Structures are given as structure tokens and as C-alpha cells.
């Protein structure tokens, strides 16, 4: 029934459009005698003005977006040592983009307005100019050369892991649809592992090699705790499909690939508690809680439960399509002081004690 | 060479028997009919693709709310009108596949290469009419298989249009990786065969069948674009075919090209030694050139339409050709920028950053040349011209953010977020679609002998233009805030609650933009039958197709094929009465051809 009604409405809309256009066409036919379907001077004028309107629209949408959503926690307020270098590069790139966008869109739309066609007017026969071509080849070359050098410098610094810093080695283990973390224990060395060694009955869920001495003191957790200020080297594994370990606040991401170990390293610089106190985050959380209170009202009215209050936590989220529950594959990250971290670690079970015999 | 083509085509023409309905409209070997077949099939696939996008946009804006449309269209996948998470991923996947391959590759390139190559170079038909027919029918078959895959029990392919294994290889990893994925792969294999046959035909035709006087440097930029596109297609599509075949082997015959060490649903699988990263390399070796396969023909169409409607020569003809060549060359050595965080060696990432950012140079040259083309022109604001200007606008906006995504250091944090979605939709989705619309508005009279209604064209353009920016501009910002793509709902992340209203705004723009396409469809299908009759050269254009009679005949021209005496951009040339001089008009005494 609904389908039928929808079809009827659509048919009526189509008829309405048809009639309206017919009126337009008839009105135009009286005043013109040009080729049907080809733009007239009047069309040129009207569309020329709309071009300027559209230019204004592009500028307005740019300004509105920048003002409303440009104050992004992901453009500042990073929580890792290399974060600010990415943020600076991002801001430099955005500024260049913004300048080029503003100028070129202006030229394009303004010319479309300024040179709108008129009967009897002649266009300029201007087919070539090597100087101009050279200018707009060389300027992008210079700008891009700068961006490439800057970008590659940043990239190499981020991706080059300095093993001499004695980084904390942590394995991130992905499976449909959750994350586990594995710490090397007292020796800070991860034991050998392979999915073929997984023994669910004995609770060897990550497939650790039980005969490897390095594996005995490994610690497997469902929350990722990191001491602030110490370099961390993540070793990523996946047991089933591709996943991607995305830690947006640390400007960190690496895919987890079955059959191989990938890695990414960074140094967290702000504890969770410190991050919660930053003005940007206080404002963001307050805003989110306002939204949640509003949404809760609607939910309660429908007889459902209200939403919990939001408190900021760092997250590890899956960012590579991995199946049905991809949208809910996350792990909490806690960055804390060295003492808090050690205290937490002590409460965790070592691998050899977690096995069921 | 051209003399041979003449006699050969004449023979063909002379021997042609009476056409039946079947040989004229169905198994036609005439390039003009095949172009229309491509266009209409592409349009139908486009409608399916757009409706899918509107459905998943509604799910993102109003997650898990019952929706009558879902109930009507999705059936068992939307119990009580609430969309299922599996079908969400399937919709995203099939939307991408359909739009990239079926609409913007076959629908765009197939339509205009077929229509314009013989007509603009002065040939009777394609080099092989039969292969051309086979190419279309393979495309049709692959479309049918793709549509059938939507109806399989466990759901259509749902691993993303990039179908990365192991997700796409293991039926136990997700429902869509069973029969749905098998059909997807079969459909794509047929599609690639179709595309290769078409491309070979285009290349051979452009090289061999140009009319007398049509040197390569007198070709319209459309032909250059189609020619280079076909070459990229021939170079890169076979690699996707090999990837698809290897994936089929892994799926069905137990090989381990892409799979290794997998434990899923309580058991270890036998696969050992393969790597999903290998698949990513093979996929993107096509996948990246593919975006240029999509955008280059649109660039060619836009160049032609801008020159015609500006009543000015295209600015920097040689630079335009050089930049097409540069883009084509670079497009084959940048694929790794999709894989910065795939686990690939970071050094490779550096190399790909370098080559990727280089592409901005020929792109910038093109954009500035288009802007200079309209400078001091006498712009005829036909709907095709509006779409061309729109093309340049979205190409710039979308292209600029490529500087961020192509930079490996920045890609770390925006990889696979909505920032990427916004970027590629503007730069290759919307832009290519604008190019396609521009081409349709411009060459509709050539295809159907009737005009499209221009007022409907204006409504269509302006509403679409506003909505395209309304959808994709704010999307950059939610991407920069870290929102991952391909999430069925964001409600599990209170972190992103403040972005929910942006998603609602985006969806509203998308719905308006989607619905306004009805105006276009109405105009298109209505005008085929009821449009005003066209004159022979309505846009007062210089290229050869407008010297052919309005009524379609086999062999395109009655009598001799016109000879070419000048390049295709003699608009407003001083010393002529008209503001355009068709290519078949000999040079006047003392008139100089520009040094091309």
C-alpha cells in the first residue's frame, strides 16, 4: 500500500515538473527565436549570476565548517611525542590548500560570471602561452618539493624505531571483533606465538609457544595500559582477517595482517588524567554530554534507558573493514604514571599461571 | 591508410542487409547504437548504486531506526525496517563496485569512447564492430551477474569494494563472502574481459582509422583522453583479473596465495605462506590507475565542451596532451599510497609519497588551463557547460586534499576515515559524474537527434552542485575528527557523538541530491521520445561528428568521409566570419594553422 502511494506521489511530482517546464518553455518560446535547447543571452546572464552565488556558497560552507567543526581535537592536543609533528604538517598542508582553493575557485566562478556570453561579442583567440604554462608548472613544483621534503622527513622520523631507547614491547592482537594486548613481562621479550598453537581448552588463546621460556612471564590483557613518557613498540598480529589498529589521539595506525607481524612505535606524552584536564577535552566532553542528555530525554520518553555520562578515554579502534561487528571493535587505552602502571601490571596473571591444565 | 578504411567501410555499407529489430537494437555492431546501450545500462546500474548510497546514508544519520524504504527494498535484511549490520556492509561494497566499474568505467568510457571515437576521427565505425558488440554484451552479462548477486541467500559481497582477503576469501568470516563473493568475482572477471575488448578496439581505431589529414596533433582532446585511458586499461586491468583468479583459487581450490596462519571460529585453517599484502599490491596496481580510467575521459569531455561553449580554443593544447600523458604514466607507479599503513616497508611508503605528490603538477596544469580557457571567452551557459565548470570546481576541491592523503605521514591519521571518502568522492566520483552529465547534455542531440530540455538541465545542475558540496565538504571534517568509514553505526563511540548532527546534515543533502536526479532521468528518457528536434550542429562546434547527418546511418557519413584541414579548436579565429571553423574547412589563402 505504501509502495503504491509512493509511486502515485512520484507520478504526480513528475507531472507537476512536466507542466511547470512546459510553462517555462512556452514563455520563452514567445520571446526568442533561437535553436531550441540552446542557451540564450538571458540564460547566460541568469547562470552567470548564479555562478557568483555558488562561489559565495562554497566560501560560506568552508567558513561554517571551519568555525563549527574546524576546532578539531585531532588537529591539536595530540598525546604522543611525534603527534605535534604530524599536526604541524597537517596545518601547513591545510593552509596551502585553503589558499589555493580560495583563489582558484574565485577565478573559475568569477570568469564564468564575467565572461558570460552575449550575442555579437567575440571571444579572444588565445591558444597558447609558454610563459604562463611555465609559471603554473614551476610554482606547484616548488610548493610540492617543499611538502615532499617536509613530509618524508616527518614520515621517516615516525617510522624509524630506535631499539636502543629500550622501548616497552607490546603485542596488539586482533580477532573478530576484539583486541588483546600482550606484554613481554619482566624480560620485556614476547614469547614465540603462532595461531596453530592456539588451544582454547587450555586457555592459550593467543597461540603462545608453551615451551618458549620467554613466553612464560608474558601477560595477556583486554585493556591497554601504557606508562607515560616511555617509548612503546607495538607488534601487531591478527588471527583471522585484516584489522587496523587505529589510535587517533596518538596519531598512530597500522594494519594487523594474518601471517605476518607489523609494527608501529610511539611515546605517549599525556596520561589519561592529564588529557581529561586539557581545556579542549573538557569542552569537547561537556559538549558531548549535553548532546547525550538531550538524546536521553527522547529515549526516556520512549521508555528506554538513558545514556551513560561520557568520560574521556583513549581508544584503540578497528579501522579496516573486518566483518559484521567492525563498528564495535575497540579497546580502552589507559596512559598512567610508571607507578600506576607497575601496580596494574602486578595484578595481571602471567601466561604460565593462566593456563588450564 | 584512410583510403583503405574508406573502401573497407564502403564495402561494409554496401553489403549490409536489411536490418531486423534484433540486429539494429540488440546485437548491433554499430558504434552509435552500442554507445546508447552502454549509456542506458550504465544509467540503470547508476540508479541502483545511488539508491544504495541513500539507504546507507539514512542508516548513518538515523542509526537503527525503522525505515519504510528499508522494509520495502531490503526485505529480510531489514526486520521491522531496521537495517541489518551485514547488509549495511554489502550496500557499501556494492555501491562502490557499481559506481566505480559499472557507471564510471563502462557507463562513461563505454558510452563516449564508442560514440565519439569513430565520429570525431572520421571513421565509418570501430575497427572491429563484432568485438565491440561482444564487449557490450559481456558488460551486460557482468551487470546481470552483479545484480543477481544481490539476491543470494547469505547476502551479496560485503568486504568493501576492495575485497581484501582474508575477509573476502573466507565464507565463515562474513555471510557475504560465500556465494555473494563468488558471483562478485565472476562478474568482475567478465567485466574485465569486456573492458579489455573495448580498450583494444579503441586503441586500434584511433591509431588506424583516422581520416585524411587527422594527424595525432589535430585530434580533439576527447580522443586523446579515450586513447590514453584505453592504454591504461589494457596495462592495468589484467592485473586485477589475475588477482581475482588467484583469489578464486584460494577460495575454491585450497591454494594460499593471499592467506596464511588463520584461526577462525575455533579452528586453524590449512593456509600457509601467502600474504594479504600481495593482494593489496595487485588490487591497487589496477585500483589506482582505475581512478584515472574514470577521470581522464571526463577530463577529455570537459576540455571539449569548455572550448566549444567558451567560443575559444582550449588553452595550451599541447600542455593538455602532455599532462594527460604524465598523469597516465604516473598513475601506474603510485598505487602504494593506498597501503602506507598496510605493513609495507616504510621505505616504499617514501617512494610512493614522492611519486604521488608529483601527480599534483600535471593536475594543476590542467586546472589552470581550463580556467584560462574560459578567461575572456564568450561563455554559452548550456547545461553541459555548467557541468564542465562544476567539474573543474569539484576536481580542484577534491584534488587538493590529495596532498594530505598522498603524504604518508599525514595518511597515518586520516587513513580509512571519512576524510578519504570525502576526497575520492569529490575528485573522482562527483567530478567524473559531472563529466559524464556534461557529455550527455552535449552529445544527446548526436545520440538521439533531439535536444534535452535546458531548463530541467539547469535545475538538475544547480541542485546537484549545491548538494554535492553539502554532502562531501563537511565530510572532510568528520574524517579529520577521526571517524572511521564503513561503520554501521557510531553509537558505540560516545567520542563521536558530537559528529552525529553533521551526519544528519550530510544525509539530508544526499537525499535531496539523490531525488533531484529524477528530474534528470525524466528529462533523459522523456527527451529521447518527446524532445525538440535538433539541428545538425546545435552548439556550433568544430569537430567532425557534427558534420555527420542527424539521422544515424551505417558508416556515419553519406558519400566520402570529410577530410581534415585544421585542428579542432578554431573558435573565434580572427579573419573568419563565424566564431567557429569546422575541421573539414580548408585553410584560407594565407591563413596559418597554429603550429601544432
Image (cartoon, coloured by chain):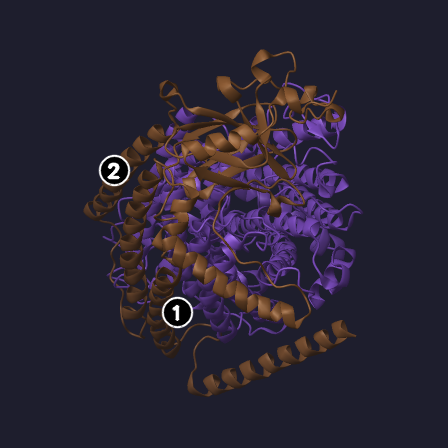
Chain colours: A brown, B purple
Q: Is residue A93 visible?
A: yes
Q: Secondary structure at mark 1?
A: loop
Q: Is residue B42 left or right of residue A166?
A: right
Chain of the residue displaying label 2: A
Q: Which residue is mark 1?
A: B381
**Residue A236 x/y as whole percent:** 53, 28
For residue B102, the mark is none
- Given residues B136 and A87, the one toward you in this image is A87
Q: Nearer the viewer, mark 2 or mark 1?
A: 2
- Given residues A323 and B389, the one toward you in this image is A323
B110 up-or-down from A213: above or below: below
Chain of the residue displaying label 1: B
In three-dimensional space, the C-alpha distance between marks 2 and 1, rounded to whole angstroms, equals 39 Å
Q: Is residue B361 visible?
A: no
**Residue B543 x/y as whole percent:** 42, 55
Q: Which residue is mark 2?
A: A146
Task: Give the quarter of the image for residue B83.
Answer: bottom right
Amino acid at each position: 500500500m505504501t509502495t503504491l502511494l509512493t509511486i502515485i506521489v512520484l507520478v504526480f511530482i513528475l507531472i507537476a515538473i512536466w507542466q511547470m517546464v512546459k510553462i517555462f518553455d512556452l514563455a520563452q518560446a514567445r520571446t526568442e527565436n533561437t535553436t531550441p535547447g540552446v542557451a540564450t543571452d538571458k540564460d547566460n546572464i541568469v547562470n552567470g549570476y548564479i555562478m557568483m552565488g555558488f562561489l559565495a556558497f562554497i566560501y560560506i560552507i568552508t567558513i561554517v565548517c571551519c568555525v563549527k567543526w574546524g576546532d578539531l581535537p585531532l588537529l591539536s592536543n595530540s598525546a604522543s611525542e611525534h603527534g605535534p609533528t604530524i599536526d604541524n604538517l597537517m596545518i601547513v598542508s591545510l593552509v596551502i590548500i585553503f589558499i589555493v582553493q580560495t583563489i582558484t575557485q574565485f577565478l573559475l566562478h568569477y570568469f564564468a560570471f564575467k565572461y558570460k556570453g552575449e550575442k555579437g561579442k567575440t571571444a579572444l583567440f588565445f591558444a597558447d602561452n609558454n610563459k604562463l604554462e611555465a609559471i603554473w608548472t614551476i610554482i606547484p613544483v616548488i610548493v610540492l618539493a617543499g611538502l615532499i621534503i617536509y613530509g618524508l622527513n616527518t614520515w621517516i622520523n615516525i617510522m624509524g624505531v630506535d631499539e636502543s631507547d629500550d622501548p616497552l614491547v607490546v603485542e596488539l592482537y586482533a580477532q573478530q571483533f576484539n583486541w588483546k594486548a600482550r606484554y613481554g613481562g619482566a624480560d620485556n621479550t614476547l614469547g614465540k606465538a603462532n595461531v596453530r598453537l592456539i588451544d582454547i581448552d587450555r586457555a592459550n588463546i593467543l597461540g603462545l609457544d608453551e615451551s618458549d621460556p620467554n613466553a612464560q612471564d608474558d601477560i595477556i590483557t583486554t585493556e591497554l595500559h601504557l606508562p607515560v613518557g616511555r617509548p612503546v613498540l607495538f607488534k601487531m598480529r591478527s588471527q583471522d582477517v585484516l584489522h587496523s589498529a587505529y589510535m587517533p589521539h596518538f596519531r598512530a595506525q597500522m594494519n594487523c595482517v594474518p601471517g605476518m607481524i607489523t609494527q608501529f612505535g610511539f611515546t605517549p606524552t599525556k596520561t589519561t588524567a592529564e588529557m581529561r584536564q586539557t581545556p579542549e577535552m573538557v569542552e569537547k566532553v561537556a559538549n558531548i554530554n549535553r548532546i547525550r542528555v538531550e538524546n536521553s530525554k527522547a529515549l526516556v520518553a520512549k521508555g528506554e534507558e538513558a545514556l551513560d555520562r561520557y568520560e574521556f578515554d583513549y581508544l584503540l579502534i578497528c579501522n579496516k573493514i573486518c566483518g559484521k561487528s567492525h563498528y564495535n571493535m575497540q579497546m580502552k587505552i589507559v596512559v598512567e604514571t610508571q607507578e600506576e602502571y607497575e601496580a596494574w601490571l602486578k595484578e595481571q596473571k602471567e601466561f604460565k599461571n593462566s593456563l588450564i591444565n | 591508410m584512410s583510403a583503405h578504411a574508406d573502401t573497407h567501410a564502403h564495402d561494409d555499407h554496401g553489403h549490409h542487409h536489411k536490418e531486423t529489430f534484433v540486429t539494429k537494437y540488440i546485437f548491433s555492431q554499430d558504434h552509435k547504437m552500442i554507445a546508447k546501450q552502454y549509456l542506458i545500462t550504465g544509467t540503470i546500474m547508476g540508479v541502483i548504486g545511488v539508491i544504495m548510497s541513500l539507504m546507507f546514508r539514512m542508516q548513518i544519520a538515523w542509526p537503527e531506526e525503522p525505515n519504510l524504504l528499508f522494509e520495502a527494498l531490503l526485505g529480510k535484511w531489514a526486520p521491522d525496517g531496521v537495517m541489518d549490520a551485514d547488509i549495511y556492509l554489502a550496500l557499501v561494497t556494492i555501491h562502490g563496485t557499481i559506481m566505480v566499474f559499472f557507471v564510471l568505467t563502462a557507463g562513461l568510457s563505454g558510452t563516449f569512447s564508442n560514440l565519439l571515437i569513430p565520429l570525431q576521427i572520421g571513421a565509418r565505425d570501430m575497427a572491429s564492430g563484432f568485438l565491440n558488440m561482444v564487449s557490450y554484451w559481456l558488460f551486460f552479462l557482468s551487470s546481470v551477474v552483479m545484480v543477481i548477486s544481490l539476491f543470494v541467500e547469505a547476502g551479496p559481497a560485503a568486504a568493501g569494494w576492495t575485497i581484501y582477503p582474508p575477509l573476502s576469501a573466507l565464507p565463515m568470516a562474513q555471510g557475504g563472502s560465500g556465494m555473494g563473493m563468488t558471483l562478485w568475482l565472476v562478474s568482475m572477471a567478465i567485466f574485465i574481459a569486456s573492458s579489455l575488448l573495448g580498450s583494444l578496439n579503441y586503441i586500434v581505431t584511433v591509431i588506424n582509422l583516422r581520416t585524411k589529414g587527422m594527424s595525432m596533433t589535430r585530434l580533439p582532446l576527447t580522443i586523446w583522453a579515450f586513447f590514453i585511458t584505453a592504454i591504461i586499461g589494457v596495462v592495468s586491468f589484467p592485473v586485477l583479473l589475475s588477482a581475482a583468479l588467484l583469489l578464486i583459487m584460494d577460495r575454491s581450490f585450497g591454494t594460499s596465495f593471499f592467506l596464511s596462519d588463520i584461526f577462525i571460529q575455533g579452528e586453524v585453517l590449512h593456509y600457509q605462506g601467502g600474504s594479504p599484502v600481495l593482494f593489496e599490491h595487485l588490487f591497487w596496481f589496477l585500483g589506482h590507475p582505475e581512478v584515472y580510467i574514470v577521470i581522464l575521459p571526463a577530463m577529455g569531455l570537459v576540455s571539449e565542451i569548455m572550448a566549444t561553449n567558451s567560443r575559444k580554443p582550449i588553452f595550451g593544447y599541447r600542455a593538455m596532451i602532455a599532462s594527460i600523458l604524465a598523469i597516465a604514466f604516473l598513475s601506474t607507479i603510485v598505487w602504494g599510497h593506498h597501503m602506507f599503513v598496510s605493513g609495507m616497508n616504510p621505505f616504499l611508503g617514501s617512494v610512493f609519497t614522492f611519486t604521488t605528490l608529483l601527480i599534483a603538477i600535471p593536475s594543476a596544469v590542467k586546472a589552470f588551463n581550463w580556467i584560462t580557457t574560459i578567461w575572456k571567452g564568450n561563455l554559452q551557459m548550456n547545461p553541459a557547460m555548467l557541468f564542465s565548470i562544476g567539474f573543474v570546481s569539484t576536481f580542484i576541491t577534491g584534488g587538493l586534499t590529495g596532498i594530505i592523503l598522498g603524504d604518508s605521514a599525514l595518511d597515518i591519521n586520516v587513513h580509512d576515515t571519512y576524510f578519504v571518502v570525502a576526497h575520492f568522492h569529490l575528485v573522482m566520483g562527483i567530478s567524473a559524474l559531472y563529466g559524464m552529465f556534461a557529455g550527455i547534455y552535449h552529445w544527446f542531440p548526436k545520440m538521439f537527434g533531439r535536444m534535452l530540455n535546458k531548463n530541467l538541465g539547469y535545475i538538475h545542475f544547480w541542485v546537484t552542485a549545491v548538494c554535492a558540496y553539502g554532502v562531501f565538504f563537511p565530510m572532510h571534517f568528520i574524517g579529520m575528527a577521526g571517524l572511521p568509514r564503513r561503520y554501521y553505526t557510531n553509537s558505540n563511540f560516545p567520542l563521536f557523538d558530537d559528529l552525529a548532527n553533521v551526519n544528519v546534515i550530510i544525509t539530508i543533502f544526499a537525499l535531496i541530491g539523490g531525488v533531484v536526479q529524477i528530474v534528470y532521468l525524466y528529462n533523459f528518457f522523456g527527451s529521447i521520445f518527446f524532445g525538440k528536434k535538433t539541428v545538425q550542429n546545435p552548439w556550433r562546434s568544430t569537430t567532425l561528428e557534427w558534420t555527420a547527418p542527424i539521422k544515424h546511418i551505417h558508416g556515419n557519413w553519406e558519400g566520402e568521409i570529410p577530410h581534415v584541414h585544421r585542428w579542432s579548436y578554431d573558435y573565434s579565429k580572427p579573419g573568419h566570419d563565424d566564431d567557429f571553423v569546422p575541421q573539414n574547412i580548408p585553410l584560407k589563402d594565407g591563413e596559418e594553422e597554429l603550429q601544432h
